[in-house]
Amino acid sequence: MESLRGIESFVRSAELGSFSAAARRLGMTAGGVSKNVAKLEAEMGVRLFQRSTRKLTLTEAGEQFLQQVASGLDTIQFAVANASNVSGKPAGTLKVGMAMAFGRDQILPLLGDFMARYPDIKPDWRFDNKQVDLIAEGFDVAIGGGIHLTPGVVMRELAKVHLVLVASPAYLQKKGMPMAPEDLYTHDALMRFSQTTNRITPWQLRNQAGERIAIEPTARAILNDPEALCHAARDGLGIVHVPMPHVLRYLKEGSLQRVLPDWYSEGGEISIYFTAKKLMPAKTRVFIDFIVDHFKAQQLAQQWSAIDHG
């Protein structure tokens, strides 16, 4: 097992270009990764890396060794992980990344059921609005939208997401209901600041007839979280443009209502992302199936469609 740790430290360091990046991937310290590689080099009697303060460079022996062992490392780890559980049940730590508000509202309520169904899996769920790098940061799975597909990462679409305009009944009674997209310029607009683009997000609207219009009203207030926008709108502070997953429960309870219900925005897809391995660990496979089955059973793709809720 010590040799396997050394090989894993070597392979990840070679793939990611540094001991510190490999350490983040493996959940270790950079010193620990460097020590593992040094032990491996001592056992083999060859130097695998040329080390400098800026980067790691494979030696000729290192390049040759990487070609020989890299493809088999995942297979060995898969076999070790599955053999370590004599009952044959899915087991191990499952590291999952998801956006804060979405993960809290949509995925966290499933935690108890998942843990009861798979008691030998230890969920390690990270809630963060930044984009994750599955391979570099050592995630088994990520759930969200717009995650960059780096080499070795694949995705499975769960649902398309639409954004809609909403306001509280009290606000609309006071300010009046807009009848056309241009009327939005006369209303109090609560705008979203995107941490991805570092700018205020305009309202790119379309209808089922295919007409499109971009609305960029003067912001009455700026917030960077869709859930905060829903709360502000519920308090009667203005009109907001938010994804259906965040606003649906407010629409159902009547604290918010659609504005210009013929108009909506396409917000991309919510997908589940995972590494493309020939032999997927059982813990990862059952979690993906669990999430996909939940989305199908709850018909979330239909519920998050603005067209179905006109």
Image (tube, rainbow, N blue to C red):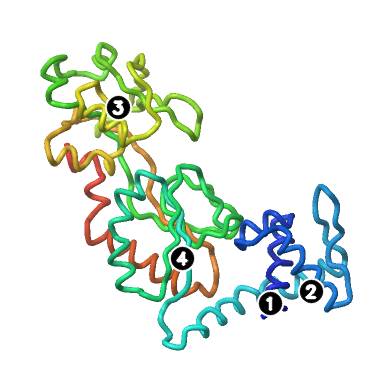
Quadrant of image for the C terminus? top left
Question: Which residue reaches farthest bottom?
Answer: 86
Q: Name the residue under label 2.
A: 40
* x and y percentages locating residue 179 in the rendered image: 17, 18
> Which residue is located at x 36 percent, y 27 percent?
204
Q: Nearer the viewer, residue 34 or 59?
A: 34
Q: Mark 4 points at which residue?
A: 94
- Alpha carbon of mark 2 to alpha carbon of mark 4: how far? 28 Å
> Which residue is located at x 52 percent, y 59 percent?
139
User: Which secondary structure lies at badge 1?
Assistant: helix
User: Which secondary structure lies at badge 4?
Assistant: strand
Residue 200 lies in what quarter of the image?
top left
- Alpha carbon of mark 3 to alpha carbon of mark 2: how far? 63 Å
Considering only vertical position in the picture, is 150 above or below 28? above
- Alpha carbon of mark 1 to alpha carbon of mark 4: how far? 21 Å
Sequence-earlier tag: 2 or 1? 1
Sequence-earlier tag: 3 or 1? 1
Q: Mark 1 points at which residue?
A: 4
Q: Mark 3 points at which residue?
A: 211
Label 3 amino acid?
Glu
In the rendered view, does 264 fall on the left or right side of 178? Answer: right
Q: Nearer the viewer, residue 115 or 299?
A: 115
- Alpha carbon of mark 4 to alpha carbon of mark 3: how far? 44 Å
